[in-house]
Amino acid sequence: MASFNHTPSDASTFILMGIPGLETAHIMISIPFSTFYIIGLLGNFTILFVVGKEQTLHKPMYLLICMLALTDISRSTSTVPKALCIFWFNLKYITVNGCLTQMFFHHVFSLMHSSILVTMAFDRYVAICNPLRYATILTNARIAKLGLVGLTRAVLFILPAPLLLSRQPFCANHVIPHTYCEHIAVVKMSCGDITFNGTWNFVLVFVIIGLDLPLIALSYGLIIRAVFRISSKEAHQKAFNTCTTHSWVILTSYTPPLFSNLTHQFGQGIAPHVHIILANLYFLIPPMLNPIIYGVKNKELCDKVVKYIYRM
């Protein structure tokens, strides 16, 4: 593969190394990367297209699915194309501003994704525990407002980190041993005071693990309690089927980043390239699997998708 690598003319440039230790396998690694990315784009854009076209799907639950699809597309697109440029063309250079911009967007969409999952859990709680009031509690307008609140929360939490890093002096070594501008990797290159950035990273983890996950767990705990109060086995089955799809999405969304964080904290003996691959799975696996999960588990959505496929 021809190299399009050029030496940067100024010090305001970082070098993304891709996956150090596996440089000779970059082309092979790019095959699953690009495959997962394309499948994710096709699946999520299909959901957006079908829901947008079908008036019968203009409901709160499908609006949430569309919001999840948008964040999946945005999260993967903020990191994967640059990784593929490194793998295919050896384009490793990225400006400091470009790096901080990439870091901002993939963190914003990741936190936004978590907010949507919380809203989905609340949606399922209302649908099962207060079905008669569902239409009045969760309207399309209210879901849109909750989405806006989630986006505002994400921007307010994430924006200070890149803004403060942009004012930091960076040391001579501008090499980032990663496929994208990970916050911790960029912070480690700073020669200034990084106390705030360390605190910010802790707060961000607390918001997701200490706030969002407990809210989701509380919603499903209340759902389970309500279900066991129902005597009908058919009602049990229907309620659990309703929650199964969302449970799978939650597992695919939270498992990769949690496992990656655990390996960073307690897996000092694990090779660096394993950490990097695990971090990239967060941007590849959920965007690919979520449309498949909804397509298989949600009969109404599945039927509409099949209808449009047959029309093609």
Image (cartoon, grey):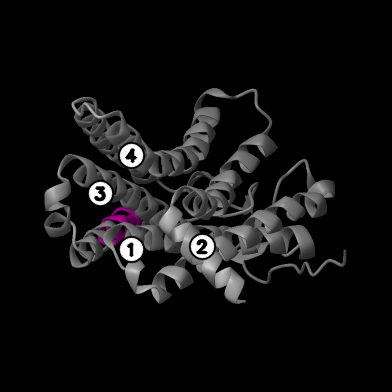
Q: Quadrant of residue 236 in the image?
A: top left
Q: Residue at x 41, y 58 (%)?
A: 300
Disc sitting over residue 63 in the figure = 1
**Which of these two is toward me, 267 or 74?**
74
Q: Is residue 283 visible?
A: yes
Whole-percent x, y for residue 112 in the image: 35, 55
Query: What residue would you read off at disc 3?
Result: 123
Q: Are marks 1 and 2 in contact (CB under 8 Å)?
A: no
Task: Give the answer, above or below, for where 19 lies relative to 11.
Answer: above
Can you tell which of label 4 and label 1 is closer to the viewer? 4
Spatial separation of the CA atoms under disc 4 and disc 3: 16 Å
Dot 3 crowding, Cα within 10 Å, few <14, some 14–19, many 20+: some
Judge whether residue 25 is colored magenta: no
Whole-percent x, y for residue 136 in the image: 12, 58
Please tell me which of labels 4 and 2 falls first in the chain: 2
Please tell me which of labels 1 and 3 falls first in the chain: 1
Spatial separation of the CA atoms under disc 1 and disc 3: 11 Å
Query: What residue would you read off at disc 2?
Result: 44
- Label 2 SS: helix
Please tell me which of labels 1 and 2 falls first in the chain: 2
- Label 1 SS: helix
Spatial separation of the CA atoms under disc 1 and disc 2: 13 Å
Whole-percent x, y for residue 194 in the image: 40, 44
Q: Residue at x 24, y 33 (%)?
A: 218
Disc sitting over residue 251 in the figure = none
Query: What residue would you read off at disc 4?
Result: 238
**Which of these two is toward me, 39 or 54?**
54
Amino acid type of the residue that numbered disc 1 sits on in the rendered structure: Leu
- Label 4 SS: helix
* Extent of the magenta region: 151-161
Q: Residue furthest right?
A: 1
